[in-house]
Amino acid sequence: DAKTTQPPSMDCAEGRAANLPCNHSTISGNEYVYWYRQIHSQGPQYIIHGLKNNETNEMASLIITEDRKSSTLILPHATLRDTAVYYCIVRVFNSGGSNYKLTFGKGTLLTVNP
Amino acid sequence: DTAVSQTPKYLVTQMGNDKSIKCEQNLGHDTMYWYKQDSKKFLKIMFSYNNKELIINETVPNRFSPKSPDKAHLNLHINSLELGDSAVYFCASSPRGNQPQHFGDGTRLSIL
């Protein structure tokens, strides 16, 4: 899996948009970008994933640059409950066996402040 | 309804003991996983089963033995517990291996 780079921490004001960047300059053509988060004392939670087009769901939006070397996760209106460690993971989608695993990095600790 | 449930939530035991952690998912998923999160908060895959067949075994000591009696359950048995086994163990499942994974809330194992 391609390596990802994320800032160790970020702050965001409650109600504002939180934009979390991720660099994945060695991403391959068949690798997807996944985002998970881990709220304190809980298991990781899937947020969103994409290949090259921008994606949106009820939790967040994912913006992937045209060259696919970086992406941004956007939480449009951050709340205190969004305080968590956010992980950007790059993984091959259409393959089996050992590629099923998620390789977690250190992630970004997002702190949403009142 | 809890989608991926692990028991126990907390496990405190002495070095050298043997213990098991159970995991059940009610999502109808085919693939299940065990991850370990150490004191530095790094999350690492340990095992994965697909339809009761072992597909990932990531250089985990032989003291750790996963067992999948059916595709809804993946248990983890640990023999001769060591201090370094203290960690949070997360179970997860996915419809297929390449689909998003759903995690349980973890089992916090402390070795005295």
Image (cartoon, coloured by chain):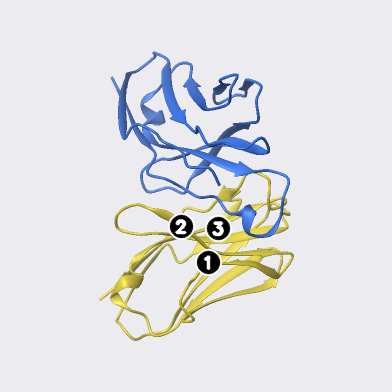
Chain colours: A blue, B yellow
**Which image quadrant is residue A34 in?**
top right
**Sequence-wise, which precedes: disc 3 or disc 2?**
3
In the image, residue A91 above or below residue A59:
below
For the residues beneath circles 2 and 1, the answer to whether they share a chain is yes
Helix, strand or loop at label 2? It is strand
Q: Are marks 2 and 1 in contact (CB under 8 Å)?
A: yes
Q: Position of residue A67 (x, y in %)?
A: 58, 22
Look at label 2 and name its amino acid. Lys
Q: Are marks 3 and 2 in contact (CB under 8 Å)?
A: no
Look at label 3 and name its amino acid. Ser
Q: Are marks 1 and 3 in contact (CB under 8 Å)?
A: no
Query: On the image, numbered disc 2 is attached to which residue?
Result: B44
In the image, residue A69 above or below residue A28:
above
- How many other residues sit within 10 Å of disc 3, few (<14), some (14-19) or many (≥20)? many
**Residue at image point 45% right, 66% down:** B8
Residue at far top of view: A16
Q: CA distance from mark 1 to mark 3?
A: 23 Å
Query: On the image, numbered disc 3 is attached to which residue?
Result: B5
Q: Relative to residue A60, is residue B53 drawn left or right?
A: right
Along the line of sight, which residue is nearer the eye, B100 or B12?
Answer: B100
- How many other residues sit within 10 Å of disc 2, few (<14), some (14-19) or many (≥20)? some
Query: On the image, numbered disc 1 is attached to which residue?
Result: B58
Name the front one of labels 3 and 2: 2
Look at label 1 and name its amino acid. Glu
